[in-house]
Image (cartoon, rainbow, N blue to C red):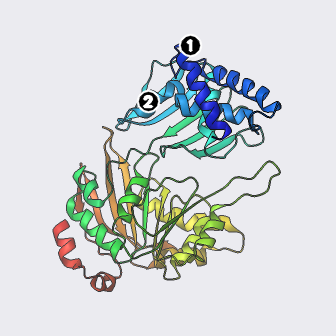
Amino acid sequence: MDALSVIEAESRELIRRRGLDTRAEQLDGLVREVIEDYDRRAATGAVPMLRDPDSAVATIAARIGGFGPLQVFLDDPEIEEIWVNSPSEIFTARNGRSELTPLVLDNAQVRSIVERMLVSSGRRLDLSSPFVDALLPDGSRLHVVIPSVTRRHWSVNIRKFVARAHSMGDLAALGSLPAGAAAFLEAAVASGLNVIVSGSTGAGKTTALNCLASAIGPRERIVTIEEVFELDLRHRDVVGMQTRQANLEGTGEITMRRLVRESLRMRPSRIIVGEVREAESLDMLIALNSGLPGMASLHANSARDAVVKLCTLPLLAGENVSAAFVVPTVASCIDLVVHLDILPGGARRVREIVALPGRVEEGVVEIADLFHLEGERLVRGDGFPPHPERFARAGCDLTRLLGRAA
């Protein structure tokens, strides 16, 4: 057995003998007690040396007790998100609505829980790097900010990936969009159209990307690019890549731009950019304009705003990038924008689906209304998608698809 396994077994035995709850507040101290005893034995050569005792405490505590008092919220399948504004202000979200929990912690408990959560990610949090994005073992996304960026307390956000849908049919069954519109989007992806999914935070963009990706053919090779792994594609041939923060010496950072460029050397049939935020949008547009189909998501207030944002973000890549290049590139290589929204009752819906016919008038990209929300119902607009020949080549009857969705 390795050192961690020995310490875990001894910690569990000590918990059993003392009759403690594995989620008790004393767990970290108990594990540290076991490690101190282990270190004394290691000094005599009886057992192998332990390289990083502090990391071992967090690792063993996480293995035995989960994530302390927050574990009950992580185990609740109805809770979508958890955030800690202060040790006495802990919120959760169910069905898109937030609620204050009765749980009260102290600063030491919050820090201990975060340290446990970061153990498996290999990412760090300190004064030189006061922000962190990391993935928890169950697929939840962790974001933490510490003082003095925050005023006083650690700010912790855990977004659980509570996906109830894995295909467009699943989304239709949940009421996010009509079956006809779902069938059209499946056909669009199968035909190789480039799709952007937009919406606010928590609107379901990642779930929508997963569902759209289910329409990609089984023989296609997919490369995904994300800040932190969130996509959960159920294909055989998938390579996922995520960014990496700089080390303590300030080197070793891997950016989204680098990953997009590297993905083109990996023989992809499709690329999926988990979220476009900055200058990587330029590299994505160049990739999509080279005949490589793909998808991405971004934050926006509407489908029109998403198009405007795509025309603006690439300008961050440098002074030599101009709107005269970016705007027509967006018009020619983005085919559809699917915009999501959260309704006042907390339900997530597709608010609109627009097409980009490829035309630009006075520096403005033209869009065509394919579907829009009337009340709580998505209805057919008067527009048509580009590239009808691609639908025909994929064996999709575009007229029938749009007729069914009307």
Residue under the image location 57 percent in, 75 percent down: 266
Q: Which percent across, then down, holds residue 350?
A: 32, 55
Element on which disc 2 rests: helix
Q: Is residue 114 visible?
A: no
Q: Which residue is mark 2?
A: 73
Residue 88, by quadrant, is top right
Above or below, 328 relative to 22: below
Residue under the image location 78 percent in, 42 percent down: 128
Q: Which percent across, then down, holds residue 145?
A: 65, 37
Q: Which percent across, then down, holds residue 92?
A: 44, 30
Q: Disc number at residue 18? A: 1
The kind of residue on which mark 2 rests is Phe
Please state, as top left, top right, bottom left or bottom right, where the N terminus lies in the image: top right
Mark 2: few, some, or many residues within 10 Å (few <14, many ≥20)?
some
Residue under the image location 71 percent in, 27 percent down: 35
Please state, as top left, top right, bottom left or bottom right, where the C terminus lies in the image: bottom left
Residue under the image location 56 percent in, 52 percent down: 228
